[in-house]
Image (tube, grey):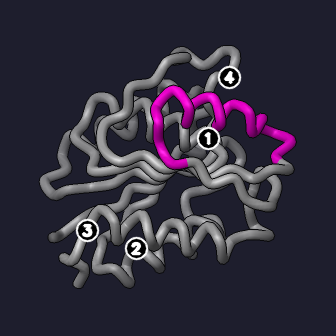
């Protein structure tokens, strides 16, 4: 199975930050093609969703969406309008005042990773989302950036990719 992985970065990071680079390497190891969308010129999360949807409208292969913080919101909201095989969310900015969408109905497999010590996005937001969606939630040691637990994040992401690809990994 040929699959693309589209990464969406957070509000104050860039398209090829250290976390995305490490996860992109894992996706490549599983035979996936990767792209990280640059939203650095857009502060509004819902305009970022429009950019991602524009890119996905040209996607011909299966794909998954990966989003961190605001990028988690962007990936999740976009997933409702496209046929994503899955959505992998890292400390997603969900249920945030001022964001247009406050309820979510994602398509495909959804997994959430959130650090217990996150002081930017309350961990209770991810707990609420996971409970409402009945999806996997991984609460791990770490803050919002999850850099101190990046090896755990890598392992969880690898398992997520394998679960979508099944035995079709390259």
Estimate the spatial distance between the alpha carbons at disc 4 and disc 2, rounded to whole Å. 29 Å
Mark 1 and 2 residues: CB-CB less than 8 Å, in contact?
A: no
Q: Position of residue 3 (x, y in %)?
A: 24, 65
Q: Nearer the viewer, mark 2 or mark 3?
A: 3
The residue at the point 68 percent across, 50 percent down is 114
Q: Nearer the viewer, residue 143 or 160?
A: 160
Residue 70, compared with residue 111, is above or below; it is above
Q: Residues within 10 Å of mark 1 (few under 14, many from 20)?
A: many
Image marks 4 and 3: residues in contact by CB distance under 8 Å:
no
Q: Is residue 116 left or right of residue 110?
A: right
| Count of numbered circles on the image | 4
Q: Secondary structure at mark 3?
A: helix
Nearer-the-camera pick, 158 or 56: 158
Callout 3 touching callout 1 (CB < 8 Å): no
Upstream in sequence: badge 4 or badge 2:
2
Q: Secondary structure at mark 2?
A: helix
Please report the residue visible at 28 percent of the width from the left and 79 percent of the height from the top. Answer: 31
Disc marking residue 27: 2
Q: CA distance from mark 1 to mark 2?
A: 20 Å
Q: Which numbered tag is attached to residue 165?
A: 3
Q: Which mark is residue 92?
A: 1
Residue 4 is one of the magenta-drawn residues? no
Counting residues from the N terminus, which is met first, the one under dot 3 or under dot 1? Answer: 1
Numbered tag placed on residue 96 in the rendering: 4
> Which residue is at 28% across, 45% downward?
84
Q: 85 left or right of 90?
A: left
Residue segment shown in magenta: 118-136
Q: Residues within 10 Å of mark 4 (few under 14, many from 20)?
A: some
Return the mark for residue 159: none
Residue 112, position as x, y percentages in the image: 56, 48
């Amino acid at each position: 199975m040929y699959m693309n992985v589209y990464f969406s970065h957070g509000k104050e990071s860039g398209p090829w930050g250290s976390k995305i680079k490490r996860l992109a390497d894992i996706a490549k190891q599983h035979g996936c093609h990767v792209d990280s969308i640059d939203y650095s010129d857009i502060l509004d999360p819902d305009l970022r969703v429009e950019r991602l949807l524009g890119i996905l409208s040209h996607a011909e292969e299966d794909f998954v969406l990966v989003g961190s913080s605001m990028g988690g919101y962007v990936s999740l909201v976009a997933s409702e309008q496209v046929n994503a095989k899955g959505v992998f969310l890292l400390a997603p900015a969900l249920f945030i005042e001022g964001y247009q969408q406050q309820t979510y109905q994602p398509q495909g497999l959804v997994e959430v990773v959130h650090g217990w010590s996150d002081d930017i996005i309350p961990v209770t937001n991810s707990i609420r989302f996971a409970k409402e969606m009945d999806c996997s939630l991984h609460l791990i040691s770490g803050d919002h950036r999850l850099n101190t637990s990046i090896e755990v994040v890598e392992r969880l992401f690898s398992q997520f990719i394998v679960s979508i690809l099944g035995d079709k990994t390259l």
